[in-house]
């Protein structure tokens, strides 16, 4: 009779790893949104794990910031999923989308500064592909309805949206744009860029 090796408790270990990862991502989002220079040690402590455990999942600060940014963008995208935005005329929908996006981005703007320090711009853009597809659909609808310009390529207009929103976060953090001005400035800037020329 052949003896089989006792099975190791892999599911329990996997569940522990998943809990640790979730705790690290939550702590990283919270700490980096408050201070873009928060250390890996601070994040590990806030997550209730050791640095060895954290580095076991995220081997570098860059990998950690990359994962935290992905986590924050996914949460933001879930918030932006709003039927009223899809139903409204395109200019009104764009204004609503910008206000909602800014509310989220303002909470996490320091996390984006942390990402800017360690990640390539293209990598940051990759994390935003899902929410930017929503922006692309909205701009395309506005073009079809005759509300938005058609003389510039659609991908370029999506890039402009991405650039303007993230520049607003940088200007707000630097103190060159007052907190109570950002939404109005964003909406007016984007709608003026998107409107059809007369």
Image (tube, grey):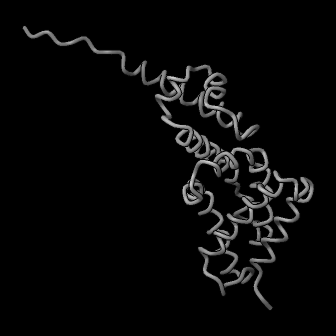
* Viewer-nearest residue: 89 or 64: 64
Residue 26 x/y as whole percent = 64, 32
In the rendered structure, the answer to whether residue 60 lies left or right of residue 13 reads right
Q: Give coordinates of residue 90: x percent, y percent.
A: 74, 72
Q: In which quadrant of the rendered view does residue 89 lie?
A: bottom right
Percent coordinates x, y for residue 156 in the rendering: 62, 75
Would you place residue 33 above or below residue 189 in this image? above
Residue at the image point whose x is 42% and y is 20% from the top: 13
Which corner quadrant holds the C terminus? bottom right
Residue 113: percent from the left, percent from the top? 70, 49
Q: Which quarter of the figure has residue 37? A: top right
Residue furthest left as drawn: 1
Taking the view exactly as shown, the residue that stands out farthest to the bottom is 198
Tell me: 93 left or right of 128. Answer: right
Indicate the quadrant containing the N terminus: top left, top right, bottom left or bottom right. top left
Q: Nearer the viewer, residue 158 or 171?
A: 171
Left/right of residue 79 with respect to residue 18 in the rendered view: right
Number of residue marks: 0
Up the image or down, 197 lies above or below 114; here it is below
Residue at left offset 79%, top offset 49%: 106
Please give the name of the residue rendered at 80% of the width and 68% of the height, measured from the top-left corner: 92
Q: At 53% from the left edge and 27% from the top edge, which residue is drawn?
A: 54
């Amino acid at each position: 009779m052949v003896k089989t090796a006792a099975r190791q408790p892999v599911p329990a270990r996997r569940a522990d790893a998943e809990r640790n990862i979730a705790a690290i991502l939550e702590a990283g989002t919270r700490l980096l949104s408050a201070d873009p220079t928060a250390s890996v040690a601070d994040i590990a402590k806030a997550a209730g794990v050791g640095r060895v455990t954290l580095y076991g999942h995220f081997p570098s600060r860059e990998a950690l910031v990359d994962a935290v940014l992905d986590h924050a963008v996914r949460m933001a995208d879930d918030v932006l999923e709003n039927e009223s935005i899809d139903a409204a005329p395109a200019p009104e929908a764009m204004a609503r989308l910008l206000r909602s996006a800014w509310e989220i981005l303002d909470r996490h703007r320091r996390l984006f500064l942390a990402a800017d320090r360690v990640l390539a711009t293209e990598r940051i853009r990759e994390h935003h592909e899902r929410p930017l597809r929503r922006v692309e659909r909205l701009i395309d609808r506005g073009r079809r309805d005759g509300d938005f310009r058609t003389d510039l390529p659609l991908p370029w207009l999506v890039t402009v949206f991405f650039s303007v929103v993230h520049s607003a976060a940088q200007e707000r953090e630097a103190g060159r744009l007052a907190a109570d001005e950002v939404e109005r400035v964003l909406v007016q800037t984007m709608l003026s860029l998107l409107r059809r020329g007369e």
